[in-house]
Image (cartoon, grey):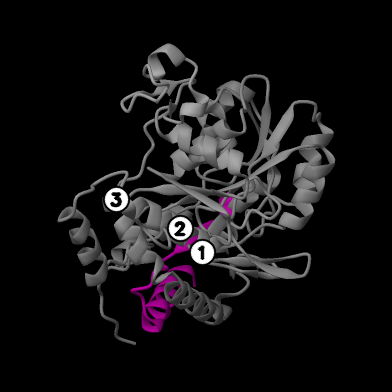
Amino acid sequence: MTYNKKFIPYARQEIDEADILAVLDVLRGDYLTTGPAVDEFENKLCEVTDASFSVSCSSGTAALHLATGALNLGPGDQVVVPSITFLSTANAVRYVGAEVRFSDVNPSNGLMEAQHLEEVILEGCENIKAIIPVHLTGQVPDMDALSEIAGRHGIRIIEDAAHSLGASYYLSGKERAVGNCAISDMTAFSFHPVKNITTGEGGAVTTNNPDLAKRLRTLRNIGMIRDPDQFILHKDAFDNKNQPNPWFYEMHELGFNYRSSDIHCALGISQLSKLNQNNEKRRQLAEHYDNQLLSLSPRVRPIHRIRGCRSAWHLYSVLIDFQDIGISRSETMAQLRKLGIGTQVHYIPVHTQPYYHRLYGDQNLPGAMAYYARCLSLPLHVAMTNGDVERVVDELKSILT
């Protein structure tokens, strides 16, 4: 078959004229930051996730950092993180001075499961204060099982849902949107350009806890407090009629400049309006991949699916037995790139990174290493067609067979 040889990246943003006009409206308006677009974006994100509160911020990394800070995690505390994830998941724990306890994952899909959490707890759970389950590729791990274990041990839950906005899963027989926080304290999202929606750069945390929402907002705004009821320096805070001075603010703890702007949120509002249709397109493309890859089975296999999860399919990752086939992953990726097809690896096990190896030494996580050895992310984004999927699979077949 003859294909259009355009380059197909593994992921990319999809920006249309409505997105551009939304940003232009803000640029022509009165507010570039901390204005109405921020509030509107956060409200719409609550609608999408069924969460009570949404706090936008400057990146997915910032969202995770704010979440660990909001739980008052710190030195002496331990947080369980699966080794197959992006660096930010573990780094957010270290930013607050807590220790990372890496868990293993299912080698067929890269997700932390209940048994992996139990293994870490059996090694000693006195100081384990939180877990951060990762929704890898857009699939949701078994949150029912994880939360049951966490609840027994008094462990808090922050979901890393950077890959799964718009996904859903069944919890106690009821379908729930990712980010609803029914059994977690908070859920962190990323809106980087390759994610299912983008704000250019950006992130958000959802929660149902008003105290956590309040603390998240304080931490993202340099720790500044403008609520007169919380002021400590009363002599400076109030005038001689006991009215708060309009310029006054206090800082009770160290915060961060993690605010999102109206420019970013205007783009996010427009993007959210297309989330459902774009995720449906991703699901359709993923299904087409599944069917096309049958001809390469068992050498190439889609990752194992989670029952009851309606994935957002941020990534389409496959498992390839490179050693059995006799071709390396790097050579496979290089040949595909020459043929106009971009691929990527998600992810290098974080416990092997030099920083974490210096901290914690060698760790035996066979599931993570097995997943890493075989995983490859094929192109998946909403600008693709079924023909693009067929081209990717045909070119992969020409290399591997």
Say left or right for 17 vs 371. left
Is residue 397 covered in magenta? yes
The image shows residue 54, relative to residue 218, as above or below, that is: below
Q: Which mark is residue 47?
A: 1
The kind of residue on which mark 1 rests is Glu
The image shows residue 60, relative to residue 328, as above or below, that is: above
Is residue 134 covered in magenta? no
The kind of residue on which mark 3 rests is Asp
Quadrant where the N terminus lies? bottom left
| Number of marks in picture | 3
Please say if the residues under marks 1 and 3 sit with CB atoms less than 8 Å apart: no
Give the secondary structure at mark 2. Answer: helix
| Residue at the disc numbered 3 | 262
Q: Residue 8's x, y, as percent?
A: 32, 68
Tell me the residue at 29%/63% (across/down): 338
| Residue at the disc numbered 2 | 43
Say left or right for 384 vs 123. left
Q: Residue 228's x, y, as percent?
A: 46, 27
Which stretch did the figure color magenta? Answer: 372-401
Please say if the residues under marks 1 and 2 sit with CB atoms less than 8 Å apart: yes
Give the secondary structure at mark 3. Answer: helix
> Which picture quadrant has residue 9?
bottom left
Please say if the residues under marks 3 and 2 sit with CB atoms less than 8 Å apart: no
